[in-house]
Image (spheres, coloured by chain):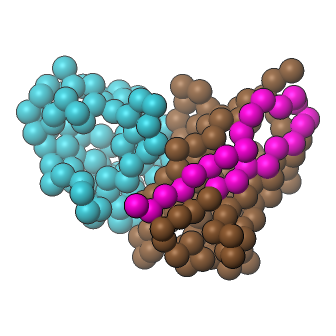
Chain colours: A cyan, B brown
Amino acid sequence: SYKLTQPPSVSVSPGQTASITCSGDKSGDSYVSWYQQKPGQSPVLVIYQDTTRPSGIPERFSGSNSGNTATLTISETQAMDEADYYCQAWDSSTYVVFGGGTKLTVL
Amino acid sequence: EMQLMESGGGLVQPGGSLRLSCAASRFTFSSYEINWVRQAPGKGLEWVSYINPSGTIIYYADSVKGRFTISRDNAKNSLYLQMNSLRAEDTALYYCARELMFGDGAFDLWGQGTMVTVSS
C-alpha cells in the first residue's frame, strides 16, 4: 500500500525557515496537501495541489513537489506556527493516505 | 460560517456498534465529496472512508472494510458512519471532512470531531 513518510520532528528558530518533507513510494503521481494541527484543534488545510495556498493562509507557507518528495516550507517562522503538520495524497489503490505527521517546534 | 458538526460518539464495549452523524450547515452539502478521518489519542491522522455527492461511490480503509458503513442523506444535510464489530483499536476522535472542489482530494473543512472509546 502507498505510504507517505515524514520526519517525526523538526526544530526551527523564530524568523528562520522550516522545511518539512514528505516522501512517497511513487514518483509524483499524486498531488499533495498539507495540514496544520494545533493541540486540541481540528486540522487546517494550509497547502493543496502541491503548491496552492487556501485563502487566509499566510504567504510564508509554501509547498513544492519533485520526484517522490513533497516539501512544506514555512518562511520567517513564528511561534504561532508551532504545531503538528501532516501531508496527504490520493492513491488509486489506497485512496487517501496521510503521512505520520511532523511536530514543528519553534525554539 | 460553513460548518460540519459530528455527534454520536461515546463509550462502547468491544464487539458493539455505534452510529456517528455529521451535520453540515451553510453550504450546499449535496455538491461535495465527504470523508471520515480518525485520530487515535496521541497519534496521527488516519483516513477511514469516502463518499461521493450522490452516495454512489464509496471507499473504505482496509482497517474498517466490512465493519463500517458510510452513508449520507442530502435532504437532511447529513453524513453517517455505522460502526459495527468495534475493536479497541477503533478508539479515536472521528472527524468528518469536506473535500475541496477541484482540489484533488484536499480536505478544506473539518468538524470538531466526536470521540469513540471502545473498552470493556
**Quadrant the N terminus of chain B occupies:** bottom left
Instruction: Relative to A21, say whether B2 is above or below.
Output: below
Q: Is residue B4 magenta?
A: yes
Left or right, residue A73 beside residue B34: left
Residue A73 picture location, percent across and down: 22, 46
* Residue A93 is at least partly visible in this image: no
Occupied quadrant, residue A86: top left
Front-most of B117 and A100? Answer: B117
In magenta, the rendered stretch is B1-22
Occupied quadrant, residue A22: top left
Front-most of B22 and B67? Answer: B22
Query: At x 75% / y 65%, what residue is drawn?
Result: B71
Front-most of B58 and A21? Answer: B58
Query: At x 57% / y 62%, what residue is drawn?
Result: B24
Instruction: Relative to B30, say whether A23 is above or below.
Output: above
**Quadrant the C terminus of chain B occupies:** top right
